[in-house]
Image (spheres, rainbow, N blue to C red):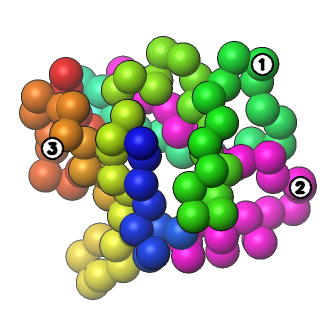
């Protein structure tokens, strides 16, 4: 199960409210890149793909493709707003290694 902290829920809700187009959900993706080999990505989606996992987490609809799901299962997503860093931070118990910023990992 993917979890969102209250700060992450609040941030996602703010982004959804500010969207100029209707939002079907928040897409979580994993792609090659980052300092640890794989990096997380997020974007607001206007439609769900046929093969997406659709998860409801604290009122937020998450959309995850079948290849990404095993890599983000049990991940916790937080939103940090500090003097040195503002953005989403991922804590992934499936990661063999993770960069210090929490945006990339390896399995």
Q: Earlier in the sequence, mark 3 or mark 2?
A: 2
Left or right: residue 56 compared with residue 22: left
Q: Which residues are magenta?
A: 10-33
In the image, which is nearer the foreground, mark 1 or mark 2? 1
Is any part of residue 36 visible from this angle? no
Number of the label disc, if any, that sits on residue 96: none
Q: Nearer the viewer, residue 29 or 34?
A: 29
What's the distance in space between the residues labelled 1 and 3, CA to CA? Answer: 32 Å
Residue projecting furthest to the right:
21
In the image, which is nearer the foreground, mark 1 or mark 3? 1
Q: Quadrant of the N terminus?
A: top left
Left or right: residue 52 compared with residue 94: right
The answer to the question of whether label 1 and label 3 lie on touching residues, with beta carbons closer than 8 A, is no
Other residues around mark 1 within 10 Å, as few (<14) / some (14–19) / many (≥20): few
Residue at mark 2? 21
Occupied quadrant, residue 4: bottom left
Percent across and percent down for residue 79 are 40, 68
Q: Secondary structure at mark 2?
A: loop
Q: Quadrant of the C terminus?
A: top left
Tell me what residue is drawn at x 69 percent, y 17 percent: 51
Number of the label disc, if any, that sits on residue 50: 1
In the displayed structure, 6 sits above or below 105; it is below
Residue at mark 3? 99
Percent across and percent down for residue 102 are 24, 50
Tell me what residue is drawn at x 65 percent, y 70 percent: 13
Other residues around mark 2 within 10 Å, as few (<14) / some (14–19) / many (≥20): few
């Amino acid at each position: 199960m993917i979890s969102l902290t209250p700060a992450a829920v609040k941030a996602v809700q703010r982004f959804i409210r500010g969207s100029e187009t209707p939002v079907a959900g928040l897409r979580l993706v994993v792609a090659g890149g980052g300092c640890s080999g794989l990096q997380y990505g997020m974007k607001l989606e206007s439609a769900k793909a046929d093969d997406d996992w659709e998860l409801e987490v604290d009122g937020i609809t998450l959309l995850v493709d079948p290849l990404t799901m095993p890599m983000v299962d049990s991940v916790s997503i937080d939103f940090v707003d500090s003097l040195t860093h503002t953005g989403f931070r991922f804590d992934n118990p499936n990661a063999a290694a993770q960069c210090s910023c929490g945006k990339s990992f390896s399995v």
